[in-house]
Amino acid sequence: MLKRRQDYQPPAFLVISVFITIDIKDDATDVTTKLAVRRNPDAAADTPLWLDGQNIELTRLAIDSVELPIGQDMPDGVDVSDHGLSVAGLADEAVVEVQSRCYPQDNTALEGLYLSGGMYCTQCEPEGFRRIGYFPDRPDVMSVFTVRIEASTAFPQILSNGNLIETGAVGADRHFAVWHDPHPKPSYLFAIVVGDLDCVTSPYVTASGRAVDLKIYVEKGNAELTAHAMDSLIRSMRWDEQEYGLEYDLDLFQIVAVSHFNMGAMENKGLNIFNSKFVLADTATATDDDLHRVESIVAHEYFHNWTGNRVTCRDWFQLTLKEGLTVFRDQCFSADMHDAGVQRANDVALLRAAQFPEDRGPTAHPIRPETYKEINNFYTATVYEKGAEVIRMLAGFLGKDGFRKGMDLYFARHDGHAVTCDDFLAAMADANNVNLDGFQGWYQQAGTPQLRVRRHAGDDVSQLLLSLSQQIPDTAAQTPRNALPISLRLAFLDQQGKIVPTRLATDAAAQDEHVILLTEEHLEQRIYAPQAANLTPSILRNFSAPVVVDDDLSPDERRHIMRYDTDLFNRWDSAQTLVSDEILAIAADPQAAVNSDRIAALADGVSHILDDPNCLDYFKAAIVTLPAISVLESRMKPADPVALFNARLAFEAALAQQLHGHYQAALDPKKSAQLADTAGGRALLNRLLALAVAAGDAQADERAMAHVLDSNMTVSQGALAAVNNRPTVVRESVLSAFHDRWQDNALVLEKWFSFESMSCISGRIERLQELMQHPAFDPKNPNKLRVVLGAFMSGNPVRFYAEDGSGFEFIAGCLIDIDKRNPQLAARMALPLTRIGAYSEQRQQQMRTVLKTVQAAAQSNDLSEVIDKALV
Ligand code: PHE
Ligand code: ZN
């Protein structure tokens, strides 16, 4: 059934408090939800009480302590369906007790209560609670939860949200625990974990002096791998106190790592549950990028305690209220912990590689969707990453203090409530006494706006006329296409590369940088400076708005920006554009010789940066990191991912030839050891080694063999990355050396799986089938499916988009199979196959044909929704 944002109705009843009992036995789990309900004065009178319940068996029902018959003799007014239970004619206040049974051992969807690696755990967001017990499973019903869980003593840990208030034995081999969470919360934040786990504890004292126990629970034997996550948690807690004055609000904060998880992690109140991939990490088993990701996810989930939990969403259309805001907060945190410019480049690279394609494809939607069939399908890069960009623009527009004032008012008004994106905007506007109505458009409209910037001569050399215009594209979402407020950060460089103060009006103050808010379709902006006509504009600095820029800069000017701009983001971005231009030129005409003049000019600019002692190694590495295929696709019509992939390889080889002097550092054991000392150095080392291999340097093979067995995982993985798509003799040895070394570590072996399936050399369908038979592969584990099939689709275009359609057929078969076990994952993994429009007629035909097969076999709402959208 299609749900519409506009159809929101308040709940008929509020749940003041709920007492839950969960009785876990090997063959089944019995759950009772005892609800103290009160009629909601805001809802239409006489509406029945509705309790969601799905894939669970109703076993008992009592109202105000009166037992009611269930099944055939159910009293009038009580109705059960496979979606829930409705009770009409209740008094304004009542106690409703419902018992039900579920089977966690058979739950492969990983929603509700399930078993992972021998432990019981739950995932309730967005609508998983209804698979555990009967309850109004919607985020605007917030209640105080008390939970009594009983299980075998084979599971020593019994965890839930809030505070532990009682434990005890039940007979000889069972025990129980009672947890109470004083903060009212919606059911999606409920969680329990029952298992035999190792636990690491750390004390924390909040700014106001509250003592908090921080605990991380992991599968037995993994305690050693939690230090980084714990440090990250402590840094996040401090940061939120310092930046937003927000403290933690319970005596206990728990993180549990589970191996079977559909997403990254989940912010359940006081009991975050994480994909173990994002907890277990040290420098021997995880790369520096992995460690950064762990830090940012720990921070993200922690930040949700205020933006998400204390103030939550009224309905799921408002998802970006908590997600966009929390991503923005974790991005700012990471920027503060590391280098802000590099962080920005990485965040934008992700936005362009993952969100822009969504806006161009069949599942395009605004950050606040208008309709959905299955809300699970809306945990998207648009809601998250583009949502964060919108918050960033707001924050930029209001300034740091203004944004903070807005946040303070938001919490003052809405703490303990379930609210909307409009409420958020209103708090921001009221706190600053400004009108933010224009920003509404960003919540209503899908599509990536295009910002066109053209320069025209002014009256004389002291003027430059900038003609700015925006265009909102047509998208599958068919949302309005009105002009949006676009923040344009702008500066100007002279011929020596220095920033020149400019004026926006003759009587205005000269400034190094301007922020123009383009609110109309067109704007003619005059720029004044002594030599205005001869300056190079630095446009959209720090990526001040989530748009595609179409400007008239020459390659020389881009190299100038790359070399001299004070905005690190724009230096990186100019390099990306120059690199993309070359790759696209090669892809357009693979037979033609690579243009060595232009590549030499580009290499010269790159060399300048690589030689610059003032540039961070991290930044240097980013400069020689090539754009993703999905980014390149946006500039080719029809897009040919195979040609782009091959062109990118050819370009890298040509660039590498020109950087011979630089990649030597990766070939010299002493110099590489030096680089390998810091995270930035390792990033650079890895890129240089890849260039050496690309250049076909004879010494590179030997270095790759040496690096793969390095004790540092970043260095080791750098070797795999360098050889994976190059037909060098050591390729197979490097991969098998890695495999043999890590075959007993399932988490580390995920890296090997993804390199195998992403290789344009070995990653054939037969190889994928072999990988799926490997002892470390587990078809019920989403991580394993992602590293084989997900990596194949995003990282192996040569095979996935193979001319004969074999890649599409193979994936289609896998999707049908996955859908039977885990619909949420199947729908997510289907997305690359649904992005049809950009490709040649032949590929489109092939994709449509396999999609029809999937459509016919799809069993879930999740998968059908995304496939149906692709086939309209
Ligand atoms: N709310 C989680 C987050 O953003 C993501 C998530 C959604 C996890 C749904 C599981 C299921 O941190
Ligand atoms: Zn989140």
Image (tube, helix red, strand yellow):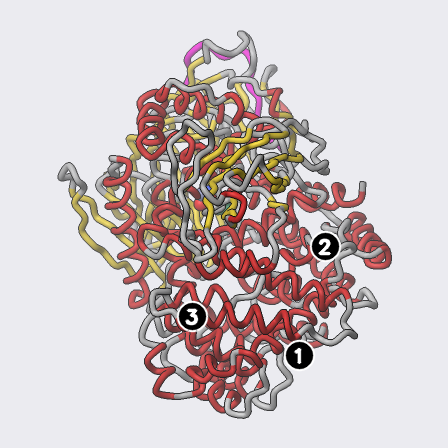
Pick whichever, 137 or 509, lies toward us: 509
Q: Position of residue 453 (x, y in %)?
A: 61, 41
Q: Residue furthest front?
A: 460
Left/right of residue 182 with respect to residue 113 in the rendered view: left
Identified by mark 1, the residue type is Ser
Identified by mark 2, the residue type is Leu
In this rendering, the answer to whether 787 lies above or below 652 is above
Q: CA distance from mark 1 to mark 2?
A: 22 Å
The residue that label 3 is drawn on is 683
Pick whichever, 727 or 96, lies toward us: 727
Nearer-N-terminus badge (1/2): 1
Crowding at dot 3, Cα within 10 Å, few <14 / some 14-19 / many 20+, comes out as many
Q: Quadrant of residue 291?
A: bottom left
Nearer-N-terminus badge (3/2): 3
- Which quadrant does the C terminus fall into? top right
In this rendering, the answer to whether 770 lies above or below 416 is below
Looking at the rendering, the stretch of residues picked out in magenta corresponds to 83-96
Determine the residue positioned at 49% across, 37% down.
129
Q: Is there a contact, CB below 8 Å, between mark 1 and mark 2?
A: no
The residue that label 2 is drawn on is 833
Q: Residue furthest top?
A: 45
Determine the residue positioned at 21% across, 54% down.
202
Which label number is shown at residue 366? none
